[in-house]
Amino acid sequence: MLSAAASARAILTSLHEVMASRSNAQAKLNRVVDVIGETLDSEVCSIYLLREGMLELFATRGLNQAAVHVTRLAVGEGLVGTIAANIETLNLAEAAAHPDFAFRPETGEEKFHSFAGVPIVRRQRAVGVVAVQHVEQRRYEEVEIEALQTVAMVLSELIANAELIDDDDGVGSSAHMTGAERLNGLTLVKGLGSGVAVFHQPRITIEHVVAEDTEAERQRVYLAFDRMRQQIDRMASQAEFGVGGEHEEVLQTYKMFAYDEGWGRRINEAIDSGLTAEAAIERVQQRTRMRMRQIDDPLLADRMHDLEDLSNRLLRIVSGQLGTAASQGLRGDAILIARNLGPAELLEYDKRRLKGVILEEGSLTAHVVIVARAMGVPVVGRIRGLRGMIREGDPLLIDADQGVVDVRPSPAVIEAFESRFARNRERQAGYAAMRDVDPVTRDGKRMTVMINAGLRDDMPMLNLTGADGIGLFRTEFQFLVSATLPAREKQTRLYRDVLEAAGDRQVVFRTVDIGGDKVLPYLRHNDGESEENPAMGWRALRVALERDGLLKSQARSLLEAAGGRTLNVMFPMVTEPWEFDAAKAVFDGQLAFLRKHKKQLPEAIRFGAMLEVPALAECLDILAPKIAFLSIGTNDLTQFLFAADRANPKLAERYDWLSPSIMRFLRRVVTTLAPYKVDVTVCGEMGGRRLEALALMGIGITRLSITPAAVGPIKELVRQVDSREIGAAMEGWLAVPPPNLRQALLDWAIARNIDCD
Ligand code: PEP
Ligand code: MG
């Protein structure tokens, strides 16, 4: 018997001739079944192709010719249908003994006992089946099956070139990938969006399957392996500075696969059989995919993803199709599909065309999610097997408010979505039209409504929303999107650009709030251990005071960037007043340095603190004389007041911002600071919600810094409210709390026609 490589090569050589001949597609298929039959010494060889959703017998040697274009099987029906539905190979000594066997009398197949069939796969979907049959009862040898699988690859190219199948016709592994489907995931960034599916890592199209020069193909694979290993080693060595957890595991697996000799050997064998480098990699990948599919183990399925990723990486290197979808540019409204993304990768996309992101992984605190939120791009995460259910170019609707994605939506679903979308847009247009109208209450009080920002890209939002300034500039975003610690010059440039874009409007820079859940790979606690409670751990000012090189460099950057202007700087997570003093001392030191070197200094420096840790509220009398402003970070503050992790979805609904305890706490802060010249701002998410903002106005808060999308709705709210009236109502409710403060506020607003949803 011929070796696998030799028999496959013999078939490939003959097929190459058939493909190059000038006959029509049907004649070529007729030749193909003869070639395979002769080479494998097989009595029957048949090709079934998917047409109009059915597997149709297109060519046969050995079965009745009258059955050609007559015998048709549904996907999942009979042995052929099962092979296509499961994208699996069947190798049976007695076909009729298989539970899925379906007898078709017109074929005359009753005298043949053994049966082997492999799927013809295109873009990971079955588009047909090639099968061999024998009279004698026997299982086929591995080499025969492999030869058949190689043939199936060539056939997929021939079929596509001859346009024998509709390219959209295909059977996925589990889903048929044609009908509408609704996928449920986890809301990571709220919002609605529609567009076509774009894979962050585009699928590689393999142009040529049959090699002209086997040695040249082998060299190409060697080189590609070398490059891939270098890339993985580089990633792993960067990770050694501390990525930790899931990431590290993935890299270890990558490394294991990248150096796996078996993998390389199998690719080499496929090249021996006459395939091009690309086809050989894909061929081995297909075989692994088929094997893995038979093992029902979630852990293995995860590893399969890793190998799939790596195999795609190798394919990209070998084919020179290196770029992500970002480098090719988005051509229209797009929804990005990825297993996971880095924040910097997301930033490479054209924000105007990126309408949503869907991730197989992802968590609320992932850096990419923080950045997407800042970009205003809705994100749904945690949809397993996503890439097997969506095809490039599929129309998608993402409703991240509800954590659902509609794939290939029906007209009714599109209609419902569009009307929601239109209502949203109408509202947005209304807010945009009113952006220059000041947020003044009915009794003439001017509220200050600012935005939270963190990227250069956020700056246009100032003009678009008509906000009064930036009440919170999260400087850590620049650190999060960078692979290494941003150089001082880079920091200075960003701060200067931000100040320039803001013009006369105030910008409050918060020094880096990293550590905890915002881990930087290049900055880690000395002992390298992960923390049990990162939100209450080594983060923000705690890191900055210990690693004062970081704070010094940021201080210098901010002071230089604000030369000739006012610099507003605040420190996150101040827990005791001495921490504020220590951080300010770092700025004073840098200021003295700049003065000595005759650099241009800021015209004025205003220092502030964030109130996020409840303990600080007990010492405000000590802190207040030293600060110009206090910003209340209600995201962190409430998690500490309620002892409820803000990232834990189980607790998300349990405690309400509109509870007497939070409101009394905040009111006490406002009252305590009233005698001092200290601006008090709320910069947590709650300030961007109307009912919450109403309550805050009721306890005397006049400054809000919120997510840009909320500026319009909040300014509209302010104009509808009489601050004295809500002040009196809140006073009453906080003295004797009603059973449900939220409901009381809502009833109050409805009675006055104040729109609060
Ligand atoms: C907060 O804690 O409320 C806050 C604004 O800071 P961050 O969300 O960045 O922790
Ligand atoms: Mg915070």
Image (cartoon, rainbow, N blue to C red):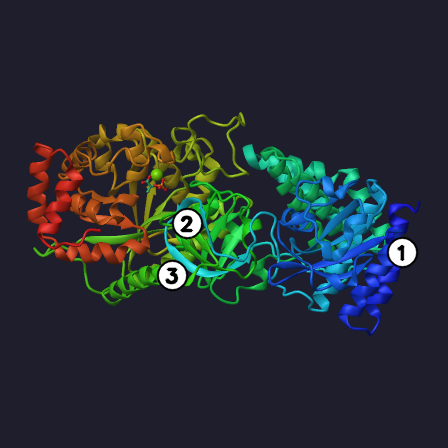
Q: Is residue 623 shown above or below 599?
A: above
Residue 444's label in the rendered image is none
Residue 181 visible here: yes
Instruction: Between residue 679 and residue 331, name the one nearer to us.
Output: 331
Across and down, in percent, residue 226 comes to: 77, 46
Across and down, in percent, residue 556 comes to: 43, 46
Instruction: Between residue 287 and residue 129, name the one nearer to us.
Output: 129
Task: Report ligand 1 position as a quadrant.
Answer: top left
Label 3 Cα neighbours within 10 Å, binned few <14 / some 14-19 / many ≥20 = few
Quadrant of residue 96 within the rendered picture: top right
Q: Mark 3 points at which residue?
A: 412
Q: Name the residue under label 2.
A: 404
Q: Is mark 2 on a helix, strand or loop?
A: strand
Farthest front residue in view: 105
Alpha carbon separation for disc pair 3 and 1: 53 Å
* In this rendering, position of residue 420 left or right of residue 46: left
Alpha carbon separation for disc pair 2 and 1: 52 Å
Across and down, in percent, residue 692 comes to: 21, 44
Q: CB of mark 2 within 8 Å of CB of mark 1? A: no
Mark nearest the camera among 3 and 1 is: 1
Q: Is mark 1 on a helix, strand or loop?
A: helix
Say which residue appears at 24% left-offset and 38% top-offset.
657
Mark nearest the camera among 2 and 1 is: 1
Instruction: Between residue 453 and residue 353, name the one nearer to us.
Output: 353
Q: Pick the quarter of the image with the N terminus.
A: top right
Q: CB of mark 3 within 8 Å of CB of mark 2? A: no
Q: What element carries label 3?
A: helix
Residue 38's label in the rendered image is 1
* In this rendering, position of residue 713 left or right of residue 494: left
The amino acid beneath tag 1 is: Glu
The amino acid beneath tag 3 is: Ala
Label 1 Cα neighbours within 10 Å, binned few <14 / some 14-19 / many ≥20 = some
